[in-house]
Image (cartoon, rainbow, N blue to C red):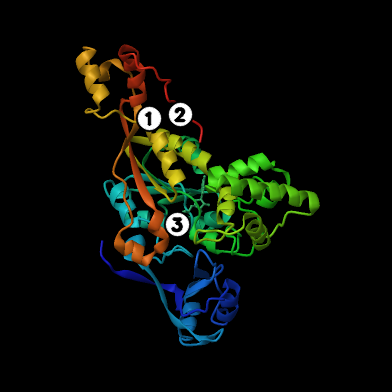
Amino acid sequence: MGNEHVYSDIEICLKYLPAETTEQALKDHFSQAGEIEGMPSLMRNPSTGKCKGMGWINFKKPEGSTNALSMDGCRFMGRNLNITRGRCRAGAVKGTVQAIGTHSPALIEEVLARLVLPNPDGVYIDGTFGRGGHSRGILAKLSKKGSLHAFDMDDAAVAVGRQLEKDDPRFHMHKGMFASMHKVMKEEGIQADGILLDIGISSPQLDGDRGFRPEMEGALDLRFDLTSGVPAHEFLQTVSAEDLEEILVKYGGEDATVAQRIADMVVLQRQIGTIPNRTQEFAEFVRKAKGKEYQAMHPAKLTFQALRIYLNQEFEQLQKGIRAALKTLSVGGKLGIITWKHSECALVIREFHAREVCPAEYPLMTWHRDMAGGDGAGEVPQSTGWYMENVSRPSARELSENSRSRSALLHILTKKRGVLIPDLEEACYPMLKIRRGKRGEQEA
Ligand SMILES: C[S@@+](CC[C@H](N)C(=O)[O-])C[C@H]1O[C@@H](n2cnc3c(N)ncnc32)[C@H](O)[C@@H]1O
């Protein structure tokens, strides 16, 4: 894929923004150029939350961005701004601009090359539509015969998908959790050739006014789907100190002592006052409870992350999603999972091991064939499971264009039929007098 870029006719890119810039101040300043779509997005320093000088604005109509381009060099909060057209990589989109807030979908070239290009006539599923960065890339590579079904639980994402549905008859948007994909696809009589799960939160969710980050002002809610479950500030009214401590450690990776202090202070706060229901106020409360943060990040970042993962059941969804994908794919079909954190990676590997198709050279398989005097594959029942290919990491070019991709990994699991290692162990270990309980499919 080349290095060419597609220039957007609705997005502008701003440079030399002052550190104190806010999304609202930018919106107020540039609405004179035309109606703005959503909120502007800013590149922020993760530890201070301050603007790092760059930002992007999407206008509803091309005239808006044309008017804004004519403001190049204008004064804004004491600085002269540089204003150019927004751009995205040509491989990510075709014949259309990239959707709001999705500047560069992570590992897009690798996703397309490994998941879609082998079969452009196939049926694909994007389980985490977001703003459609990957979906648009997939559609650009699919033939007229190919089709793409997308899922998201966030109404804002679904609204973008509904528009894409009108523009492209090969595309179908479903509101719901990706773990429901098997049920939905079965009802439609569809088996998929490839499935993508880009786990976690999208840039527009993170940078917008939904309050997913401690630095951003908003309601303390943290749900992707605002129509189900309970918002974070309500959850904090009732959760026990022990449960909250466990959530902070398990889903945030917070230090155990710090987690206990934050949990105890939440319970104390309930007794002496009320739990803040706005993000920045709660973030300040966590900062005081936690004390100094030695890592380069906001002290409340891990607390926000832990509550978000818990309230959206992200780990359970990932586990159920991988199991649903196995049922939904045809044999030979591929599941691509983009993970962002070690805990997500570990869950993918655990699910893979629970249904790993035994490679021919696996020593236990060789032993079973040779020593047990039979064809191992013949005697141990065959099932469908996973074969894992090498992981892809972002290229140097992607990292230079999108620093958020730095922790992204693309795992590719292929659905195969064969003997599963756990089944082989169960058959062989009694003969070998190795005692071990069968490692089944554990809970997330
Ligand atoms: C990392 S973003 C995906 C970004 C997308 N690949 C793009 O290029 O725009 C994850 C998206 O998945 C959604 N999501 C998270 N968990 C989900 C689940 N269990 N089922 C459906 N959607 C989910 C979130 O609302 C978010 O929009």
Question: Residue 250, located in which quarter of the rendered image?
Answer: top right
Front: mark 3 or 2: 2
Distance in Å between CA atoms under marks 3 and 2: 32 Å
Q: Residue at x 28, y 52 (%)?
A: 113
Disc 2 crowd rating (10 Å Cα; few below 14, some 14-19, many 20+) is: some
Residue 120 at least partly seen: no
Question: Is residue 147 shown above or below 164?
Answer: above
- Inter-mark Cα distance, 3 to 1: 30 Å
Label 2 element class: loop
Left or right of 203, for residue 258? right
The reply to whether callout 3 and callout 2 are in contact (CB within 8 Å) is no
Q: Residue at position x 29%, y 28% from top?
A: 358
Badges 2 and 1: C-beta atoms under 8 Å apart?
A: yes
Q: Amino acid at mark 2?
A: Glu
Foreground of the two, 170 or 290: 290
Name the kind of residue labelled 1 in the image.
Arg
Residue 408 seen: yes
Q: Which residue is mark 3?
A: 132
Dot 1 falls on a residue whose secondary structure is: loop
Label 1 environment density (alpha carbons within 10 Å; few <14, some 14–19, many ≥20): many
- Tell me the residue at 30%/59% (across/down): 395
In the rendered structure, the answer to whether residue 222 lies left or right of residue 334 reads right
Say which mark, if any, is on residue 355.
1
- What amino acid does circle 3 point to? Gly
Q: Which mark is residue 96?
A: none
Question: Is label 3 within 8 A of ligand 1 (CB to nearest ligand atom)?
Answer: yes
- State the quadrant of the N terminus: bottom left
